């Protein structure tokens, strides 16, 4: 990862290599791991986080999080929220139903 914050990625379907940020722009305003971009965070006690401003964050009661894949512990003032994959959203959308002409709408 360089000065731009871009990381190397590989497309799983076509094996194309590309560079992108760990977190997409629309999701930057949600709590996420700064190391790996993971959104599935565990809320932990503030005493378990050792960082440069931990006493200030503890005094202000800023929530502390832990990223399970990379084990990074940090404070974040951003709201935590679960990000659902597009596959899951498609499953939760209403089923397509044919109209009288036989065309499927959904």
Image: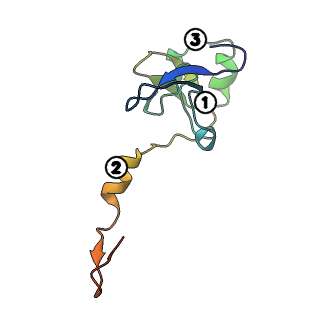
Whole-angstrom CA distance, mark 1 to mark 3, is: 13 Å
* Crowd rating for badge 2 (residues with CA inside 10 Å; few <14, some 14–19, many 20+): few
Label 2 or label 1, whichever lies nearer to me, is 2
Q: Residue 76, labelled with which disc?
A: 1
What is the image's colouring?
rainbow
Whole-angstrom CA distance, mark 2 to mark 3, is: 36 Å
Residue appearing at x 53%, y 22% in the figure: 46
Residue appearing at x 54%, y 31% in the figure: 32
Q: 48 and 91: which one is in front?
A: 91
Residue appearing at x 56%, y 31% in the figure: 63
Q: Are marks 2 and 1 in contact (CB under 8 Å)?
A: no
Horizontal side, residue 83 vs residue 50: left or right = left
For the residue labelled by badge 3, is the local secondary structure a helix, a strand or a loop?
Answer: loop
Q: Quadrant of residue 30?
A: top right
Q: Residue 88, labelled with which disc?
A: 2
Q: Point out residue 86 in the picture as x, y percentages from the top left corner.
A: 41, 48
Residue matched to label 3: 50
């Amino acid at each position: 990862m360089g000065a731009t914050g871009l990381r190397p990625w590989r497309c799983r379907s076509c094996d194309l290599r590309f560079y992108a940020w760990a977190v997409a722009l629309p999701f930057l305003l949600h709590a996420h791991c700064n190391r790996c971009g993971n959104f599935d965070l565990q809320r932990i006690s503030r005493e378990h986080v050792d960082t440069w401003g931990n006493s200030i964050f503890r005094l202000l009661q800023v929530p502390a999080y832990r990223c399970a894949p990379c084990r990074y512990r940090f404070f974040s003032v951003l709201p935590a929220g679960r990000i659902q994959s597009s596959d899951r959203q498609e499953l939760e959308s209403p089923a397509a139903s044919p109209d009288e002409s036989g065309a499927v709408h959904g």
